[in-house]
Image (tube, rainbow, N blue to C red):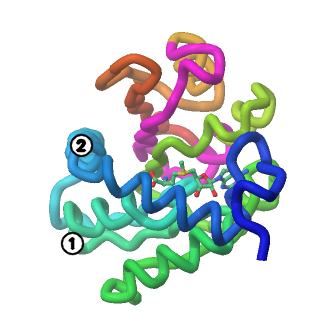
Amino acid sequence: MASAADRIPVDHHDWHSPDYVEEWIARDVTRDAERRLRLREMLAAAPAAKNDPLAVLDVGGGYGVVTEEVLDMFPRAVVTLQDYSQPMLDRARARLAGAAGRVRYVLGNLRDPAWVAAVGGPFDLAVSAIAIHNLRDSDQIAACYRGIASVLKPGGAFLDYDLFELIGGLAIQMRVIERAGFTDVACLWRQERVAIIRALRPAGAG
Ligand SMILES: C[S@@+](CC[C@H](N)C(=O)[O-])C[C@H]1O[C@@H](n2cnc3c(N)ncnc32)[C@H](O)[C@@H]1O
């Protein structure tokens, strides 16, 4: 069987390869302690109370680290974990088996506008971590932000932890997010190429 190194990677990652995903997760978990702290800080910025029965969307949720943190921080939350990698969703389903009734898995490509209808909604909160930059193309990134805005309830929030420096820079992405239908777009934390952005859906948004 071909190893991940023998395959032609898609955009330098090969998210559809079980071998590649396995290797990526094995590397990623070595950063777990620091990453989870950061994710908790991000989620603490959600305009929500601990016991709110939140409907949450995890965009490009991968093997479920962000979803797991949401489930822990908000014990009554239900999460829709969206991703286009079947191997990632398989890993997420196995990891989160104990929370089966609280997680829905949706396979969908953020480059295909059909992902928006597939996830349903409306959601109180959308979260994403190191995922959307994978789209690379500025039009597709803007369309993805618009898609997220469209499935959020008025007053809902979008929390995005991403490598904004790989896609034009933080300031540009904050403007793109605002134009996609958000208000109060703010950078909550920044370090080298990574940052966390919070953006709100206007209360009167339809
Ligand atoms: C670096 S991983 C991050 C996974 C997870 N959010 C986390 O923080 O552990 C990037 C994720 O984005 C997903 N992804 C990349 N391009 C995508 C696309 N076009 N549509 C949907 N998911 C995509 C990959 O499959 C992968 O699970």
Per the image, the residue denoted by label 1 is 75
* Left or right: 205 as drawn, with respect to 198: right
Of circles 2 and 1, which is in front? 2
For the residue pair 80 and 97, the one nearer the viewer reads as 97
Q: Residues within 10 Å of mark 1 (few under 14, many from 20)?
A: some
Classify mark 1: helix, strand or loop.
Answer: loop
Q: Which quadrant does the N terminus fall into?
A: bottom right
Classify mark 2: helix, strand or loop.
Answer: helix
Q: CA distance from mark 2 to mark 1?
A: 22 Å
Q: Residues within 10 Å of mark 2 (few under 14, many from 20)?
A: few
For badge 2, the amino acid type reads: Glu
Task: Indicate the position of residue 180 as horizontal and vertical percent values.
Answer: 64, 30
Q: Which mark is residue 34?
A: 2
Task: Tell me the magenta residue range.
Answer: 145-170
Which residue does the image show at 60% across and 31% down from the upper left? 181
Compared to residue 95, the image places residue 62 above or below, namely: above
Q: Which quadrant does the C terminus fall into?
A: top right
Which residue does the image show at 44% across and 32% down from the upper left? 199
Task: Indicate the position of residue 172 as horizontal and vertical percent values.
Answer: 60, 13
Membership of 128 in magenta stretch: no
Membership of 154 in magenta stretch: yes
